Image (cartoon, rainbow, N blue to C red):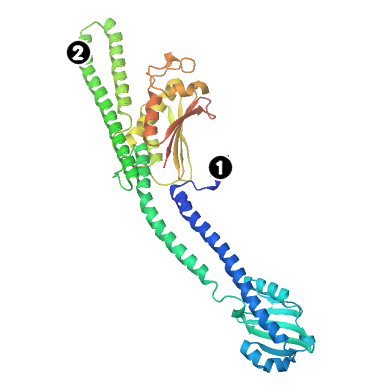
Amino acid sequence: MTFDWLKSYTPRSLYGRAALILLLPVVSLFLVVAVVFIQRHFEGVTEQMTRTASREVRALLDSGESAREAGASRLARSLQIAVQPVPTDELPRANLRRWFDFTGIIVIRELEALLPALRVIELPDDHRVILYMEQHDGIWQLQFDRRRVSASNAHQLFVNMVFFGVLMTVIAYLYLRNQLRPITRLARAAEAFGRGRHEPYRPAGAVEVRAAGHAFLDMRARIERQIEQRTLMLSGVSHDMRTPLTRLKLGLSMLEDEDRIPMQQDVADMERLLDEFLAFARGAQEGQPEPVDPVALVRRIVEDCARANIPASLVEVKGDGTGEVALRAGAIRRAIENLINNAVRYGSKAELSVLLTDRSLRIRVEDDGPGIPPESRAEAMKPFARLEPARNQNLGTGVGLGLSIAMDIARAHGGTVRLGESQRLGGLRADIVIGR
């Protein structure tokens, strides 16, 4: 038997589940004690007290005296029962009980079963019990203290249970919050690292939480060292390669134009490939995210493209979000420029749009090129991927790192790059989506 159906009703946050674990036993214990108390105290004790009071009433009725004589008798005074005659037309038509008087239900039930001559019972308040009895000389009204048939201050147990239950729940919640705080700090630090931010974190809390915190710090340090080593290695390779390329340039400058121009083009292509490798190696870990206006950033990129004679335009800005987004402006610029270059390489123009909401940022680049089939889009995101059927190899001279660099930058910001078909232009649609 599985309990999957309960998942939709349980809290999803750690605080909510911890509070449920804390409150559920307390509430269950309260309900069990309340039910037992009602059965044992409200019913059992009230039944016993009502039987005792009914015997006293029968003893007074069996005296054989009239109502006035019985009311003035020594027995009535010793039993503290007031007796007086009542005209028949003043007899109430039905029993009287307040709707919240639960012990009154038991009192009425027991008295009706134990006193055959009983006609009507009134329980107007917490102090009086009024009985109307049918006797040989008419209707008698008997009145005595309510405390003789039901326990006084029966609510004290509930008051004590509620007070101390709430008090212990608050104390347990404060303690539990201190225990859960290191876990939330660890989750916040891990989320920040996933978004490319380095948030200070120090392991604290229970032994298991400290162990998880130290494991996270070790993992973060290894990843940062790996990224640094990769960047340094490829930067060194790029630097070492530039020296022979410079010598090749000097050697080619001494050749005739007929042989020199094609070889110089090859050297320029090698330099460009080195630059792309270095950009891919650097990734998006340069600097710390800073508040940036994404719309202004995209507008500056479009203006720079216009000065470089690149057909790119900002066609739409929408969304109900305001303010700035924590971004690495240089990395985001590189990702958008890569998408623009891909768009104009395989199409005739690139159109950009920005959607900014309170929860996310979406920067879209669309082109009118051949696009990428849905089954090849996952392959297109891999480094050095070249898609022959969709993107003509002869149209560009890239090495298949443009989309990979954009994806790497988006992931460093806690986002992603999504590819689809442009409804506006019919070509490729590339979205950089980043959570706020």
Residue drawn at point x = 39 percent, y = 53 percent: 176
Residue 131 location, x and y as percent?
A: 70, 82
Residue 405 location, x and y as percent?
A: 37, 27
Residue 60 location, x and y as percent?
A: 69, 86
Q: Quadrant of residue 397?
A: top left
Q: Which residue is mark 2?
A: 247
Tell me if residue 256 comes above or below residue 226 in the rendering: above
Residue type pointed to by label 1: Phe
Q: Which residue is mark 1?
A: 3
Q: Is residue 164 visible?
A: yes
Q: Quadrant of residue 103?
A: bottom right
Tell me if residue 94 comes above or below residue 34 in the rendering: below
Q: Residues within 10 Å of mark 1 (few under 14, many from 20)?
A: few
Residue drawn at point x = 57 percent, y = 43 percent: 5
Query: Is 302 in front, or is 151?
Result: 151
Q: Is residue 417 left or right of residue 221?
A: right
Q: Residues within 10 Å of mark 2 (few under 14, many from 20)?
A: few
Query: Is 21 in front, or is 174?
Result: 21
Query: Is 332 in front, or is 250?
Result: 332
Tell me if residue 376 comes above or below residue 77 in the rendering: above
Q: Quadrant of the C terminus?
A: top left
